[in-house]
Amino acid sequence: MKKISILLFAMVVLAFEVQAVQFKQMSIHKTLEFNISGTLQSIFTKSEIDILDDDFDIHRFRLNLSGKMDDNVSFYGEFEVGSNMSETLWTASPASRMKILVLDEKIAAGARYAQKDFGADSRLVQAYVDLKYFKKFKLRIGQVPRGSSYELNTPVNKLETINYSTSVGQFGKFVRGFQLRFAPCNFLKIGLGIDDSVGGISGGTNQPKAKISAGGKIVFIPWKKHLQLKFCGRHVAETLEMPDANAGIVGADFKYKGFHFQGEAYFLHVNPVNKGTKKGLKGNICSWYAHASYMIPTTNIQIVSRYNFFEKRMRDRKTDILKAPKNYYMEIITAGVNWSFSPCSRLQVMYDVVDGDDNDSLDVQLELSF
């Protein structure tokens, strides 16, 4: 009887402890929800460029923290644990075609290695707070990706190509500021934002003369979950070093039964009317890409292709003479395959055909997510 009493007492105590733990967890969940996820990508690159060796490295190791304090306040943080360093910079060859130089500097190059570039905060990719006190309005404050880029707003484990397009390095950068988002109806979204306009692929910059940028975006969704169209505009303020500029972006995203088509076109005009030290500078930068993919039925294999074009033309306003070192264009054709072993792992094989002499490369990447 004594043993039975001790056993019953122990069961009561255990049940109480379990209930206490559950109650404690429920109390925490009522005030704070917290989630941790991450992505590890290892890559092998074989390049035709003589001065670049074949390379095997940790491409990315991203940790993501997200949660919410209550129904109106949520937060998100993304950190790069790996080096996330830039190894290459595209520059103009005498023929005005893109050529690669290897540098020790860490620069936002805006090329096929753009995903390795960063600004002052190489470890902090993005960190922001969302405030939603009104039904159709949301305010986002922190270090955020510009809303003008599909690729930059896509998690790295959802990207269908290993490398971003050149548009990301030139137009899509992560910036610090705030964004006001408004959804008046199911088929329309409107966004406004002000940010510091200067920053690399995974960070803003702490340079004291960063330029202020203001932009707006309209997203039209005529076919829910299948088709959306976007129209963006941005104004970049003048600094002592650089003139002001205006940019326009259009894009489309279509998904249906395993097919995925996506495209973006960017245009930037440098205003020749300015008071900066480079007041004689004027010119245009344009970039666009078209992306297509198809998931083969009854398999875990996805075929991917992309065409990317980039052109930069700058002139001296006084002489109106082209300056060859500042003018170049580039074309990249990407073809590859994604093979998903499970929802948490996949193998990506991509070949980049780059306009110019001996610039092509083969990238093989293994990805694990949790």
Image (cartoon, rainbow, N blue to C red):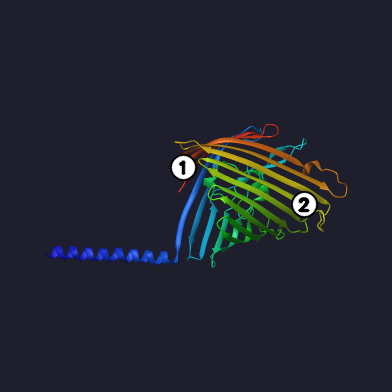
Instruction: Tell me if label 1 and label 2 are in contact, CB under 8 Å.
Output: no
Real-space Cα separation, disc 1 to disc 2, in angstroms: 43 Å
- Characterize the local packing of mark 2: few (<14), some (14-19) or many (20 or more) Cα atoms within 10 angstroms: some
Residue occupying the point 64% across, 48% down: 251
In the image, 159: left or right of 198?
left
Numbered badge on residue 60: none
Q: Considering the numbered disc 2 on the image, is that residue within a helix, a strand or a loop?
A: strand
* Residue at the limit of the structure toward the front, as seen here: 222
Residue occupying the point 32% across, 66% down: 20
Q: Considering the numbered disc 1 on the image, is that residue within a helix, a strand or a loop?
A: strand
Q: Quadrant of the N terminus?
A: bottom left
- Residue 106 seen from this side: no
In the image, 325: left or right of 161?
right
Give whichever of discs 1 and 2 has the lower sequence position: 2
Query: Residue 330 at what x, y percent from top left?
Result: 70, 39
Numbered badge on residue 270: 2
Amino acid type, label 2 = Val
Mark 1, residue position? 345
Amino acid type, label 1 = Ser
Query: Residue 311 at what x, y percent from top left?
Result: 73, 42
- Residue 339 seen from this side: yes
Residue occupying the point 55% across, 57% down: 186
Query: Residue 72 at what x, y percent from top left?
Result: 51, 66
Query: Residue 19 at what x, y percent from top left?
Result: 30, 65
In the image, 351: left or right of 66?
right
Q: Is residue 218 above or below residue 330?
A: below
Which image quarter: residue 359?
top right
In the image, 77: left or right of 9?
right
Comparing marks 1 and 2, which lies closer to the viewer? 2
Which image quarter: residue 44?
top right
- Characterize the local packing of mark 1: few (<14), some (14-19) or many (20 or more) Cα atoms within 10 angstroms: some
Q: Is residue 167 above or below residue 176?
A: above
